[in-house]
Image (cartoon, rainbow, N blue to C red):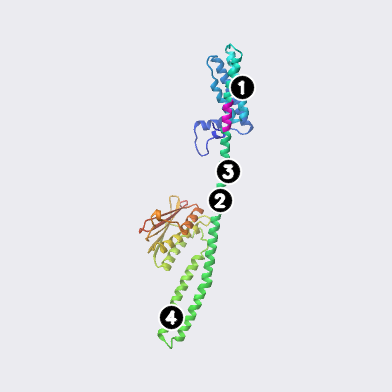
Amino acid sequence: MRPPEAFAPVPGTSGTWRESLWPRILGTSGRTRRIRYMAAAFALVAIIGTADYLTGSELSLLVFYFLPVSIAVAAVGWRFGTLTAVLSVATWLVGDIAAGARFANPFVPIWNALIALSTYLVVVWLLASVIALHREMEGRVRQRTAALTEEIAERVRLEKIVLEISERERRAIGHDLHDGLSQHLTGTALVAQALAGKIAARSAGDAAELRNVVLLIEEGIEQTRSLAKGLLLAEIESDGLAAALHELSANIREQHRVESEFSSGGPVALGQGGAATHLYRIAEEAARNAVRHGRARLVTFALAAEDGNLVLAVRDNGSGLPPPGERGQGLGLRIMAHRAAIIGATLALEGRPGAGTSVTCRLPYPTPS
């Protein structure tokens, strides 16, 4: 038997008629609720006793007294259940005597009453034990749920901290590349140019080779600046995701010498919380994996709002994903999954060996009218 609280319907569900009947009849709490349950138990004892009297002493309704006893234990407690059991036995015995029951020995009704009371007390003990165990289990479930909720919240907090640290490290490396290595290479190129001018009069061949070295250094400077620009990317504005992805596509073409395209279904405006930055980083990581690990020659980016979601898709024509049994989950994939989870999006990877890879991120997003 469930405790009274268990009869209440679960919020958000219709429930059966039994689950909604009890809250309507006894839909109070605290002292008033206990008084109503006690009154209901007493009323049931009186009704069953009256029926027992009217049916005569030959037809016993002793089993029906289990109902008020059970209600008393579940609603109030084992003490009131014991009192209800005693009252039920007394009512049954008085009703039989009043209905004309005759006993050859005065000890017979006392013995029958003791047997009935013992049965009721066993029921009271069993119900009280079950209810106590149920409440204990509910308490443990609540404790475990609270602990799990705290653990999940702490994990999410740590993931955010890790990503923030990663962004800071990106910017630090970008500054080092832009202000350190890039400047150093620029100085090296100037020195090489000056040296080429000095030896041009003595050896035209050596000067030409030195100019080629200068061109290689200048290409290194451009690549360094491009890398630094990507690492120094500040948080993208809520309406700047499409422009950032378009620029990312251009950088893929320049840095890795592969074809890259970007398509958008229209303007996108995200709310606060860095969702645009996380989506950009997911696209960046997917493109990097396609070029470095998948050896793709074409990478496409698509951004569109459809079916109440903002869908970001990155596809390539590379080597694809290995079979599920041989597929591991590298750091880049885990970071993409974490970024998607932080903003409440879902991440899906599809691909077959030799057939390219598709990375799709879906973020709940109201479709513009």
Q: How many marks?
A: 4
Report the mark closest to the observer, 4 or 2: 2
For numbered disc 3, what is the local secondary structure? helix
Instruction: Give the Cα distance between marks 3 and 1.
Output: 39 Å
Asked which quadrant contains residue 124, the reply is: top right
The residue pinned by badge 3 equals: 143
Query: Which of the two discs, 2 and 1, labels the residue nearer the N terminus?
Result: 1
Report the mark closest to the observer, 1 or 4: 1
Q: Is residue 128 magenta?
A: yes
For numbered disc 1, what is the local secondary structure? helix
The residue pinned by badge 2 equals: 153
The residue pinned by badge 1 equals: 87
Q: Residue furthest bottom?
A: 202
Mark drawn on residue 211: 4
Tell me where residue 108 appears, x and y as whole percent.
59, 15
Identity of the residue drawn at 61% across and 29% down: 78
Magenta span: helix, strand or loop, mainly? helix
Check contact, mark 2 vs mark 1: CB within 8 A.
no
Disc 1 residue type (three-letter): Leu
